[in-house]
Amino acid sequence: MFGEDDLVKSHQERADIILNIIVVCFAILLARLWYLQIYHGKMFFNYSLENRLRKDVVRAPRGMIFSRNNVLLTHNVPRFDAIITPQYLEGDDETIGYLSKILELTPDSIFKTLKKYQGQAKYIPVVVKKNISRREVAIIETESSKLPGVSVETFISREYTDKDTGAHLLGYISEISQEKIPRLRDRDKYDYKQGDFIGQAGIEQQYDLEIRGQDGYQFMEVDARGRARRHVSSDELYSGIDNKAAEPGKNVRLTIDRDVQLAAYHALDGRDGAAVAVDVESGEIIAMVSRPAYDPANFSTGLSSNYWGLLTMDEKRPLRDRTIQDHYSPGSTFKPLTAIAALETGIVDEKTQVVCNGGYRMGGRVFHCWKKEGHGVVDVVKAVRESCDVFFYSIGNKIDIDVLYKYATLFGMGQRLGIILPRETSGLIPNKKWKKDRTGVEWQKGETLSCVIGQSFINVTPLQLAMFYATMANEGKLWRPHVVKEVFSNSGQVLKRVQPELIHKFQLKPKTMAIIKQGLFDVVNTQGGTASSLRGAGIQMAAKTGTAQVIGFSADKIFNKCENQEYKYRNNGLFAAYAPAGNPKIAVGVVVEHGCHGGTAAGPVAKAMVAAYMNKYYPTYQKKIVDQETAKMTWTQIQEDNRANPVPMVPETDTKDYYDEAGKLVRNFTLEKGGGTQVGPVE
Amino acid sequence: MINFREELKRYDYSFFGICTAIFVIGILNLYSATHSQGIGPEEGLYKTQIIWFILSWIVGIVVSLIQPKNFFRLAYPAYLISVILLIMVLVVGHSALGGQRWIGIGALKFQPSEITKIAMVLVLSRWYSKAAPEQEIGFRELIIPFLITVIPALMIIIQPDLGTGLLVMLVFFIITFYRKLKWKTITIIAVFAMLGATVVYNFGLREYQKKRITTFIDPEFDAKGSGYNAIQSKIAIGSGQFFGKGFRRSSQGALNYLPENHTDFIFAIFNEEHGFVGSVFLISLYIALFYRLLWLASNVNKMFDSVVVVGILAIFFCHTMINMGMVSGLMPIVGVPLPLMSYGGSNLLTFGICCGIVTSISNARNLF
């Protein structure tokens, strides 16, 4: 034991050093406390009594959305809310009485609002009135001495250049609902705050995380009445304070052409329906319109809940994007697919002839042709041109539904095409397995007869319709439809560029496509074609009309005049096309709900879109088309003419990117209708 | 045969005495911090804290009646149990939400990392008092004690509780220093640690990784913006001035400007209410405790006892200094509680047991 005692004693030196370290540490601590409490004590004391630090959110400006030609489609405008910070509210009755006069509210309603938020911390501001006028802002600011605790908060709301024209495509933003915040935080890994705005449809929703930017914060010294005194930056007193600048959201450039979009929108005036135009060689969507629409700006101005209520009550469902979220029976616009399937599998060839006398009998049931008196002798080209149902019934009698399914799927129908927009629906192309799984009943032969003319189970979205015709135009390339060209920063740096993507490519017999293209050309450009009224104007559409029943009718009723029926029972009018026939660039799909006839209701919409597109991008080539039209050339002659005297098709309107090799923006965006927001000048 | 009366006479009341004094100040302060202006759910906290105190002191007194040689025997089993508990936390904790530092025993929740601190001190003391205790310690002698420390320390860091993990390492360093860590070794370690840290921080990490490290130290904290809390804490301390604002007069804490005001930031509230005078008084109590511990360390006759006392001193001191330093803005903010002042049952129990151990050692010394 004696030895160990010595051992402990031998550690005395280290114990003393430890004691010294402890003493030094506490000396430093006491010096620090003296510095805080005595040296700066008065300052901190006043500070704790009268002054408070407030952490203000600096809202990040939301990114803008541009058309393919850099026309501004949506941008931000400031909006003002009157707020009360309960902590600083003094002389409640008096202050609120005065405020209620300024805001033209009753004092009771203000008290009610305050009461609603009584549970939360007193330094969190409560919004008393949203979207107040500039006059009200001015009064509150100048009368602030009589309004302790009242202030004005600036928010950013959205303005859309063409109002409801792109409502569904662009979407809207609205205030995030409090219950959804935790779920959205999990989903997006983004720290949403109360009062944040979030994209709710279309591009605004789909690209929300890129468009929204990152809010910053700014520390403010506020006085006892909650009025901001000065911005606080990191200095001696506030060491550790770190203001954070807001990071502006990224901008999005769409593939949409504003003029074609407007043409489609106006052509649909007074109608319900959808129109889609797509670039044949890339899948870029050129226009995408759904009607009825709504004004997306209304959602970010503080009236959102009322407006939303009205829209959801509307039985025409204006909130739905009919281009991708609804599907329709394609009717006769589907017939080219039936013809392709039949030609490819050898069920028919160019010599096959069928006599149409207005009906087709199968299994004791008569399937009617739309033309009561019949089409006489019909071959496949005539069947497409004049839309003869009986010819297709005869195919339906021989073709297997699974074969039809195979070809429809190749052309992009019955599946989501992967357009990057919310809630795309797949439409439906039936096959035997589907029917069996779905209903438990085997496929019936008669059902095939309805399917070959685009009725029965077959349903396509207007987007699929356009993509189907684009894929016929380019002879077997199904592109991924897309609406965004690129995402770029405020300094013009391109952050993401969307490249055209092939979903798949397939080869059909050259003869098949030649026959189909002849038929589709004839629909518009020959006497007897179902859309010959749309001929001319230098656009040379190859197209197909369609009229689809909304509900089943008995035979006699089918031949009643559609316009005499009740609106909701009228047939849908469809029209799908590509143009110019000899050198396809654009494909369109149009559905006019209850429009009765494809040719007269939907056709003009397609024509307006194609014309707007051709006038803008290919005016020189149009001259050639006009020449061909004047000479009343047949399809064969046009093909020969194009081969003999080729005119190169080069877009004449500038859609080129304004960027140099380094990805820097070379020139400012053109702002056709800027609404005051200037982007740039670029660094 | 030792009679009971003599036993009582020989009993060293100083540690439990000083600690009780600090606790009484602490409980009043906790009451004040949670009762300044009608804050709902926190109101009953001081009652829970009193219950924990009574429980901890009973455990502590029982521990003080154990002979020190039994601590020597218990060192390895205690260490083993604490490592097993830490593994359990990692396994059980991962199936629960996010990081988990707690284990439930019936209704009580307990942090095994608290037991680890004490077990670590016992094991290191045993090792250092047995393995050539007359030698100075160089790198070769450091290997096993380092491994003993680093295994539980890493498990605590993974939990994640970087603060406690680093604290365990610091305690290890203080004990080793006391057990004559060579100055040469200290210098080499210091130089390499500094070089390594500088290189890694400046060249090895990207900006977001640096940020992640700071967030890692205390995730809840950064979410609210650490700068904001640091400034509010400084305002609270500074506004106390010389005499303080008085009991239950804190305004920073009351308005909830100061988050966590009953746990990690209790020292700020104390300063706001009792000023410089108050904190000088409080700090004197801590210094008295530390001085008394160091004195005991040098005046026991067993090497094991001596190292244990230094280890317990290190636990107390590191907690106190890190907490006070971070609250007054001298150090970055890591979640370390102030001994006997901050709300929390597990660490109160730890300090109760620590008091018991040193009291037992002190009592045994008087036997000679």
Image (cartoon, coloured by chain):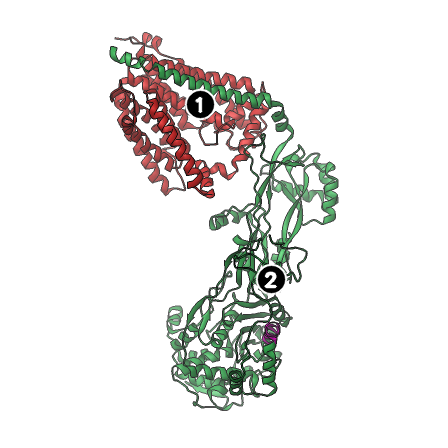
Chain colours: A green, B red
Q: Secondary structure at mark 1?
A: loop
- Splitting the image into 4 quarters, where does residue A586 fall? bottom right
Q: Is residue A278 left or right of residue B202?
A: right
- Which residue was labeled with disc 1? B340
Q: Residue at x 57, y 68 (%)?
A: A287
Q: Residue at x 56, y 73 (%)?
A: A650
Q: Is residue A565 visible?
A: no
Residue A631 % position (x, y): 59, 88
Disc sitting over residue A250 in the figure: none
User: Does the magenta-highlighted stretch encompass residue B54?
Assistant: no
Pointer 1 chain: B
- Splitting the image into 4 quarters, where does residue A440 fall? bottom left
Q: Is residue A657 left or right of residue B336?
A: right
Residue A432 % position (x, y): 38, 74
Amino acid type at mark 1: Leu
Q: Is residue A136 left or right of residue A462?
A: right
Q: Name the quadrant of the C terminus of chain B.
A: top left
Of residues B243 and A271, the one nearer the viewer is B243
In the rendered image of this protein, does residue A340 appear above or below residue B205? below
Q: Residues within 10 Å of mark 2 (few under 14, many from 20)?
A: many
Q: Residue at x 56, y 22 (%)?
A: A35
Pointer 2 chain: A
Residue extent of the magenta highlight:
A604-619
